[in-house]
Each structure stands twice: as C-alpha cells, then as structure tokens.
Image (tube, grey):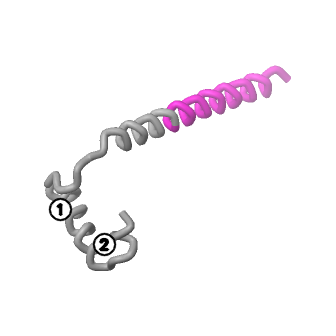
C-alpha cells in the first residue's frame, strides 16, 4: 500500500488492474474476505438504519395527518 502512495507508476499500474477487474470481470486484484465481510456488515447496518428512520418518518407523517383531521 505504501508503494502505491509513493510511486506514481505503481499507482497507475494498479489503476489499470482495477479497471480491468471492474470493466471486464478479470479477477486481477484478490478479494480480502475479512474486508468484504466488514463492508457487507456496514452496508447492512446502514440499510437497517435508513429503513428504521423511514418507518419513523412515515409514522410521524401519518400521526400529523390524522391530528389535523381531528379539529
């Protein structure tokens, strides 16, 4: 990693490998399972939080809607 940050040529070559993997499906950069699992957990936690906030917002909007009709 340090080599990528200090050597522009190495960074460029890594970029080429990354593009090959993303655009053409070549598996030139090995997947680190621990890092992938960590990302999956973060994404799952974030989606759960967003869903929870959306449910709360809908409930509050419905409460407000029915409170307005009570007058």
| Furthest residue in direction top, as rendered | 70
Which of the pair 9/2 is nearer the observer?
2
Q: Earlier in the sequence, mark 2 or mark 1?
A: 2
Q: Is residue 55 left or right of 12 when viewed as pictured?
A: right
Q: Position of residue 58 (x, y in %)?
A: 63, 29
User: Mostly what secondary structure, the magenta segment?
Assistant: helix
Per the image, is 64 magenta? Answer: yes
- Which quarter of the image is occupied by the C terminus? top right
Residue that appears at 42% across and 39% down: 38
Residue that appears at 30% across and 45% down: 32
Residue that appears at 73% across and 24% down: 63
Per the image, is 68 magenta? Answer: yes
Residue bearing mark 1:
20
Q: Position of residue 69 (x, y in %)?
A: 77, 24
Q: Position of residue 22 (x, y in %)?
A: 23, 57
Label 2: which secondary element: helix
Residue 29 occupies quadrant: bottom left
- Which quarter of the image is occupied by the N terminus? bottom left
| Furthest residue in direction right, as rendered | 71
Q: In the image, which residues are magenta?
A: 46-71
Residue 62 occupies quadrant: top right
| Furthest residue in direction front, as rendered | 2
Q: Is residue 40 left or right of 19 when viewed as pictured?
A: right
Q: Position of residue 25 (x, y in %)?
A: 15, 52
**Picture layout, residue 66 above or below residue 8:** above
Residue bearing mark 2:
11
| Mark linked to residue 70 | none
**Picture layout, residue 32 above or below residue 56:** below
Residue that appears at 52% across and 31% down: 48
Q: Is residue 53 left or right of 37 when viewed as pictured?
A: right
């Amino acid at each position: 990693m340090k080599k990528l940050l200090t050597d522009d040529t190495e960074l460029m070559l890594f970029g080429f490998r990354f593009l090959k993997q993303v655009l053409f499906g070549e598996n030139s950069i090995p997947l680190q399972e621990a890092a992938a699992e960590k990302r999956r957990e973060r994404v799952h936690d974030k989606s759960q939080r967003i869903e929870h906030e959306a449910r709360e917002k809908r409930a509050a909007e419905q409460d407000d809607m029915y409170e307005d009709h009570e007058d």
